[in-house]
């Protein structure tokens, strides 16, 4: 456990500048735009529910935006993770620790793909609260922001943090075969790995379907992308359609119940043979990565 924490700490510190920049930049830009930009609210939307609707949109939007940005950055970093350790000799550090190659590969992946985006949710929550202060104060005054139903609003926000955190883990399960395939191909082929993977899966699925009438690959890709997206956003359990500020304000009290039910439904969808098959493929890619890393370490030594 101690060695695992050491690996997590080192990986986090190695990319702390990128994480800090990606975490702070969206909030700074949002605050600048809301402070000095023009805010247009139609007459139909003005009413007693407008302040809480603006605050809810700021908080929820801030969390989602931060998580999305950090996850995209994480995928980019993870793509070159295995090859990086050989290029900058980071592998010498991993070999100095009493940990195996498997743990030295798995821990950085988990830090980037799960830990960093989940931390970004908390940062997005704080950033969203700051954005709501600026936005509501400009539209309705600071008093309106102070008089918001903070109990209901914060409970809804925390429920969404939990829902998005679990959804991120489930989406990672769905996408695991593609993510590990990406890391493996990049390790072997460098920058061409992503090109080979994109052309192989994208063009290959089209050729198989159009030329040979085999749609298994394209159907598999469509399934995992759709399910990964639903795992994060909404699995289809219940309805949380909010088209107006009144809908948004009134629906906040129902967010915790919806989030719980939707999380359970998303977890049920992940109990699928498609996920199991994908994890087997991901495990095979990971095993090949470990062997590639072992050979590289021996060669470097």
Image: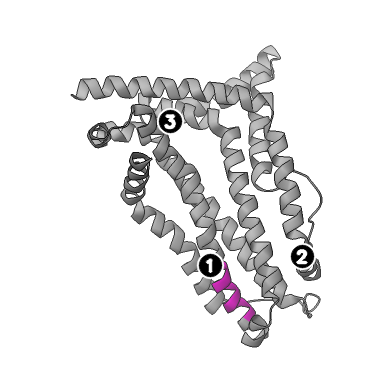
> Does the magenta run of residues contain 128?
yes
- Whether residue 184 is visible, yes or no, is yes
Mark 1 and mark 2: span between their CA atoms?
20 Å
Tell me: residue 251, above or below residue 189: below
- Location of mark 3 (residue): 183
Range shown magenta: 126-136
Q: Nearer the viewer, mark 1 or mark 2?
A: 2
Mark 3 and mark 1: span between their CA atoms?
33 Å
Q: Nearer the viewer, mark 3 or mark 1?
A: 1
Q: Residue at point 66% right, 58% down?
A: 159
Q: Main secondary structure of the magenta part?
A: helix
Residue at the limit of the structure toward the top, as seen here: 212
Q: Nearer the viewer, residue 65 or 208?
A: 65
- Location of mark 1 (residue): 126
Question: What secondary structure is found at the residue carrying circle 1?
Answer: helix
Of labels 3 and 2, earlier in sequence is 3
Q: Residue at point 56% right, 64% down?
A: 125
Residue 169, percent from left and from top: 57, 41
Q: Residue at point 28% right, 32% down?
A: 98
Q: Nearer the viewer, residue 268 or 68?
A: 268
Q: Are marks 3 and 1 in contact (CB under 8 Å)?
A: no
- Location of mark 2 (residue): 253
- Whether residue 38 is visible, yes or no, is no
> Does the magenta run of residues contain 122?
no
């Amino acid at each position: 456990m101690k060695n695992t924490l050491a690996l997590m700490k080192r990986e986090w510190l190695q990319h702390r500048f990128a994480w800090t920049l990606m975490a702070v930049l969206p909030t700074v830009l949002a605050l600048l735009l809301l402070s000095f930009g023009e805010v247009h609210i139609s007459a139909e939307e003005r009413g007693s529910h407008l302040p809480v609707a603006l605050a809810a949109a700021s908080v929820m939007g801030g969390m989602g935006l931060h998580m999305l940005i950090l996850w995209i950055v994480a995928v980019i970093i993870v793509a070159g993770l295995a090859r990086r350790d050989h290029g900058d000799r980071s592998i010498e550090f991993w070999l100095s620790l009493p940990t195996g190659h498997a743990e030295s590969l798995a821990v950085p992946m988990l830090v980037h793909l799960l830990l960093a985006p989940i931390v970004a949710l908390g940062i997005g929550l704080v950033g969203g609260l700051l954005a709501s202060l600026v936005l509501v104060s400009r539209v309705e005054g600071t008093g309106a922001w102070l008089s918001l139903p903070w109990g209901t609003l914060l409970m809804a926000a925390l429920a969404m943090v939990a829902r998005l955190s679990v959804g991120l883990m489930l989406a990672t399960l769905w996408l695991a075969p593609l993510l590990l395939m990406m890391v493996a191909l990049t390790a072997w082929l460098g920058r061409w790995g992503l090109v080979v993977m994109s052309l192989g899966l994208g063009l290959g699925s089209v050729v198989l379907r159009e030329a040979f009438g085999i749609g298994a690959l394209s159907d598999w890709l469509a399934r995992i992308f759709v399910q990964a997206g639903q795992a994060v956003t909404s699995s289809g359990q219940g309805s949380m359609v909010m088209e107006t500020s009144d809908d948004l304000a009134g629906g906040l009290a129902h967010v915790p119940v919806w989030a719980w039910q939707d999380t359970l439904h998303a977890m049920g969808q992940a109990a699928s043979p498609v996920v199991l098959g994908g994890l087997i493929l991901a495990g095979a890619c990971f095993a090949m990565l470990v062997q590639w890393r072992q050979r590289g370490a021996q060669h470097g030594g």
